[in-house]
Amino acid sequence: MRISHSHLRRPSKSAWLLIGTGLLCVLLLLVLPLILIVVSAFSSGWKLFVSNLLDADMLAAIRLTLWVALLTVPVNLVFGTLTAWCVTRFEFFGKKLLLALVDTPYAISPVVAGLCYLLLYGNQGWLGSWLDAHGIQVMFAWPGIVLVTIFVTSPYVARELIPLMQVQGSQEEEVAVLLGAGGWTLFRRITLPNIQWALIYGTVLTTARAVGEFGSVAVVSGSIRGQTNTLALQVQLLQQDYNAVGAFTASLLLACIALLTLFLKVLLEYRQRKALKV
Amino acid sequence: MNGSHSVLPGFRLSLGLGVLYLSLIVLLPATTLVLQASQIRWSELVFYFTDPRLLAAIRVTFLAAICASLSNAVLGLLLAWIISRYEFPGRRFVDTLIDLPFALPTAVAGLTLSALFAKNGWIGQWLAPLGFEVSYSFVGIVLAMTFTSLPFVVRTLQPVIEDLAPEYEEAAECLGATRWQIFYRIILPPLMPALSIGSALALVRSLGEFGAVIFIAGNKPFETEVVSLMIFTYIGEYAYEAASAVAFFLLLTSLLILLIVQLLQRRYRARGAA
C-alpha cells in the first residue's frame, strides 16, 4: 500500500501531449476491454444472459469458486499475519531465507506450480500414492484446487503487512508488554488496529486472486464439468464450446470482482492514510 | 541478536507455524519438482531439449517476454510520469485502473483482448486493412504479456518520480538544455534502478504467463506456442518427466533473473548511501 502525495503540477502544453498519449493507451488497453465484456455478455439480450447465468454448470462453477476462496483466504490470512509478525518483530538466523520463501510463489509460473502439486499429490507422487491407498483423492478434485490456490495466493497478506509493520516499528508493542499486556491482548489492542487496513487489503487481494486463478488450477482440476470446474476454467470451456456469450457472462462476474477489488483498494488506502495521520 | 531476547511474545509460535506453513505450502512442492527433475538422465534431457518444437516455443516465449518488458518500460514510464507529475482530470481514475491487470483474472484478460484485437474486433478491424494481425499471432502474445505485467513498472517507478525534485529540470531548462537533453541527462538516470527492476519483474511474470496468452496466441506449434503451454501439453500427455525438465528450466531462469534484480538493488542502494 502506497502512502504519499507530493508536488503535482499543472501540465504545460507539451505535457498535455504526454497525458493525451497515456490516456489513449489506458483507454485502449484497460477501459475498452471492460466495456467489451459488458457489451458481449448482454449482446443477445437479458434473457440469454440470465439463462447463461442460471445454467447448472455455471452455478456449480460459481459454488466451487466460492468454496475454494472460503477455504483459501482464512488460511493465508492467519499464516500470512504470523509470518509477517515473525519477520518484522524478531531478528533470527535464516530470516532472509524465510523471506525468500515467502516470495517464491511470485517467481513460479502458474503451470509450474500446478505441476509441483501434481508431482507431490498425484497418484504417482509419494504423498499421493499414500493418500490414494487411504482413499483420499486430492488431485482432480476440490482439495487439489484449494491447495494450489493457497500456494499461489500465499504471498499477498504477508507482502502487504511486512513493509507497513517495518515502518511502524515495535515501540508501541514493547510498551504494552512492559505495562503487562498478554500476547492476545497485545495483538488485539495494539497490533491489529495499526495494521487493520493493510490486513483487509491483503485479504481482498487474496480473495481476488483465489477467485480468478487459472493456470495452476487448470493443471490440477481435471476440468470435470459441473464438478471440478471453477469460474475461470468455465470461461475457457465455454469459449471452446463456441458459446462466446456464455464465456463473457462468466467473465463479467469475474470482472465485477476485479473492479470491486480496485474500489476497495482506493477506500482502504484512504483509511490507512487517515489512520497514520492521527 | 536472537529473537528470543526480545520482550515481545510469540517468537516461537510465529516462527514455528510460519516455517511449518511455508515448508508445507511452498518448499515441499518445489522440492518435489527439483527431485523429479534431478532424476532425469542426461541422455533424456538432451532428447527433450533438442526437440525443435520445444526450442521454437522457448524462442517465442523469450522473444515475446523481452518485447513485452521493453514496451512496458516505455509505457510504464509514460504512465508513471503523468500520474505522479501532473494534475489532470481523471488522474485518480487512471491511477486506480493501472492495477486492473493484477485484479482481473488472466483468463478473462486473454479472452477479452483476443476478442478486441480479432479481425472483426473493435480495434482489430482497424488494424486488419493495414495488414496488421494481432490476435492469433506473435504480436498477440506480446500484447497479452504486456497487459498482465503492466502494473510492475508503473508501481516501482511512482514513488521514485514523486521523490524527484522538479528543480533540477527547471535549472537545466534555464541553462538552455533541450527537452531531449533534460529527459536523457536529468530525468532518466535517477529512474534507471526502479525502471530496470520493474522491467525485470515484468519479464519474469511474462515468461511464465499462461492464462492470458493461450487465449490470444492461436497456439500453433513452432509458431505461437509458449513454454508454459508446452509444459501443460506434456502434463496432459502424462509425460511428467519432460514436463518437470522444462518446468525446472523455467523456474531456474526466473530465479536467476530475480537474483540479478536483487544484486542490482543492492548495488544501487550502496551507491545511494555513499
Image (cartoon, rainbow, N blue to C red):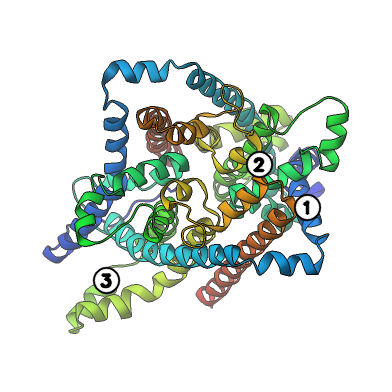
User: Tag on residue B167?
Assistant: 3
Q: Chain of mark 1?
A: B
Q: Quadrant of residue A47?
A: top left
Q: Is residue A230 left or right of residue B20?
A: left
Q: Quadrant of residue B176?
A: bottom left
Amino acid of disc 3: Glu
Q: Residue at x 63, y 53 (%)?
A: B231
Of residue B66 and residue B192, the one placed in the foreground of this image is B66
- Mark 1, residues whose alpha carbon is within 10 Å: few (<14), some, or many (≥20)? some
The secondary element bearing badge 1 is classed as helix
Q: What residue is shown with label 2?
A: A151
Q: Position of residue A151 (x, y in %)?
A: 66, 41
Of residue B99 and residue A80, the one placed in the foreground of this image is B99
Q: What residue is shown with label 1?
A: B31
Q: Residue at x 28, y 18 (%)?
A: A46
Amino acid of disc 2: Phe
